[in-house]
């Protein structure tokens, strides 16, 4: 005698429609997040004067002695000797001693994802010379911004050879 309670649909093993929709939504979110991370770019432009910069993020950084570094669109070259340092920022040279600061001209940054602007902020970088170790000059670096932005966006401005560590 045949079992009349069994139907072909009850033999199917698989996900319900709701589970399939949920997995699809999660997969879509992951794909969008990956596209955002891969296409995240920061364009640095000249800034307007007089902009307030109430937000700040601090880092401990090293600048390789005699090796040019680019932060945003500012070019920095440092040469150290004993406890003194010559800092050349965008062609302007200044002698620094331990504890002295060098302020880099304010700039404007536009953050884009997939070519679309998502955030605009003005920023200014201040470097405080801490001394030299080996072939590197050590600095405390403060990045002040006009709007609060995530640290991972700021880190896109900082070259990897500066070994930036949040302070």
Image (tube, rainbow, N blue to C red):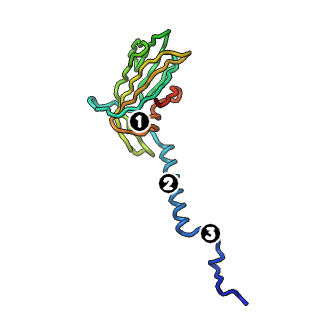
The residues bearing labels 1 and 2 have C-alpha atoms spaced at a distance of: 26 Å
Dot label at residue 29: 2
Residue at coordinates 52% horizontally, 48% vertically from top-left?
34
From the image, state whether disc 1 or disc 3 is nearer to you. Answer: 3
Could you say where residue 7 lies in the image, as x and y percent from the top left? 64, 82
Crowd around label 3: few <14 · some 14–19 · many ≥20 (10 Å): few
Could you say where residue 43 lies in the image, as x and y percent from the top left? 41, 35
Mark before the other along the chain sequence, 2 or 3 = 3
Q: Is residue 113 above or below residue 18?
A: above
Secondary structure under tag 1 reads strand
Most extreme residue toward the right, as rendered? 1
Q: Nearer the viewer, residue 24 or 165?
A: 165
- Left or right, 34 with reference to 128: right
Could you say where residue 97 lies in the image, as x and y percent from the top left? 42, 12
In the picture of the structure, the residue carrying the numbered disc 3 is 14
Crowd around label 2: few <14 · some 14–19 · many ≥20 (10 Å): few
Mark before the other along the chain sequence, 1 or 2 = 2
């Amino acid at each position: 005698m045949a079992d009349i309670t069994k139907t072909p649909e009850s033999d199917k093993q698989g996900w319900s429609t709701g589970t399939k929709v949920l997995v699809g939504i999660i997969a879509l979110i992951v794909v969008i997040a990956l596209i955002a991370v891969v296409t995240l770019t920061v364009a640095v432009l000249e800034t307007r004067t007089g902009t307030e910069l109430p937000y700040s993020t601090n880092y401990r950084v090293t600048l390789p002695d005699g090796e040019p570094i680019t932060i945003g669109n500012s070019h920095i070259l440092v040469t150290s000797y004993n406890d003194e340092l010559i800092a050349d920022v965008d062609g302007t040279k200044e002698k620094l001693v331990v504890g002295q600061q060098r302020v880099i001209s304010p700039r404007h940054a536009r953050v884009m994802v997939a070519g679309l602007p998502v955030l605009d902020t003005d920023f200014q970088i201040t470097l405080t010379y801490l001394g030299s170790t080996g072939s590197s000059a050590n600095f405390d670096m403060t990045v002040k911004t006009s709007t609060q932005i995530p640290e991972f966006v700021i880190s896109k401005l900082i070259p990897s050879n500066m070994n930036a560590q949040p302070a």
